[in-house]
Amino acid sequence: MSSHAALGAVRSGVAVLKGTGVRINHIAPGQIDVGVDLKNFDMRGMTTQLPPASLQSKEVKFELPSRLDSAKIISAQQSQHANIGLERAGLPTEIARVAGFLASGFSSYITGANLVVDGGAS
């Protein structure tokens, strides 16, 4: 589901649950560092893709690269970080803190909100 569709679901949920005391909000995270290091990752063993190649038309099919170039990955990460206000990717715990805040009593008057947690990228 796209972020815009999720926000639409939140807004309609707020209208449906009006007066019940249920609060619905949307967290829109930016780039998050989940700790996966693709440096020196060899994709030759990867044979599965979604949807399977047999179900794809010729226009959609693509070849997986035999090996990711670590210099290109590092360069791409640096250019992505330059576009973020804090110049780094976020951490999963930082998103979890926002969710914890929304679940707490401190956010008792927040509903139907879109909380953008992207380090200043937007």
Image (spheres, grey):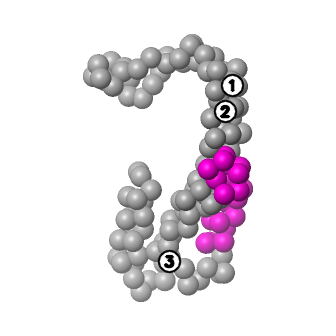
> Does the magenta run of residues contain 96?
yes
Q: Is residue 69 above or below residue 25?
A: above
Instruction: Identify residue for label 3.
Output: 111
Residue 75 is labelled as 2
Q: Residues within 10 Å of mark 1 (few under 14, many from 20)?
A: few
Kindly report the distance in space between the C-alpha atoms of the residues bearing marks 2 and 1: 6 Å
Say if residue 117 shows up in the picture: yes
Q: Residue at x 63, y 60 (%)?
A: 120
Question: What amino acid is at disc 1?
Answer: Ala
Task: Kindly state the secondary structure of the residue where label 2 is placed.
Answer: helix
Dots 1 and 3: beta carbons under 8 Å?
no
* Nearer mark to the viewer, of 3 and 2: 2
The percent coordinates of residue 117 (x first, y second) are 61, 61
Along the line of sight, the residue nearer the viewer: 49 or 71: 71
The percent coordinates of residue 99 (x first, y second) are 63, 65
Disc with the residue nearer the chain's start (1 vs 3): 1
Kindly report the distance in space between the C-alpha atoms of the residues bearing marks 1 and 3: 44 Å
The percent coordinates of residue 109 (x first, y second) are 56, 84
Q: Is residue 45 above or below residue 2?
A: above
Q: Is residue 83 left or right of residue 20?
A: right
Residues shaded magenta:
81-103
Q: Is residue 96 left or right of residue 29?
A: right
What predominant SS class does the magenta segment belong to? helix
The percent coordinates of residue 45 (x first, y second) are 57, 14
Dots 2 and 1: beta carbons under 8 Å?
yes
In the rendered image, which quarter is residue 20 located in?
A: bottom left
Instruction: Identify residue for label 1.
Output: 71
Q: Residue at x 59, y 83 (%)?
A: 108
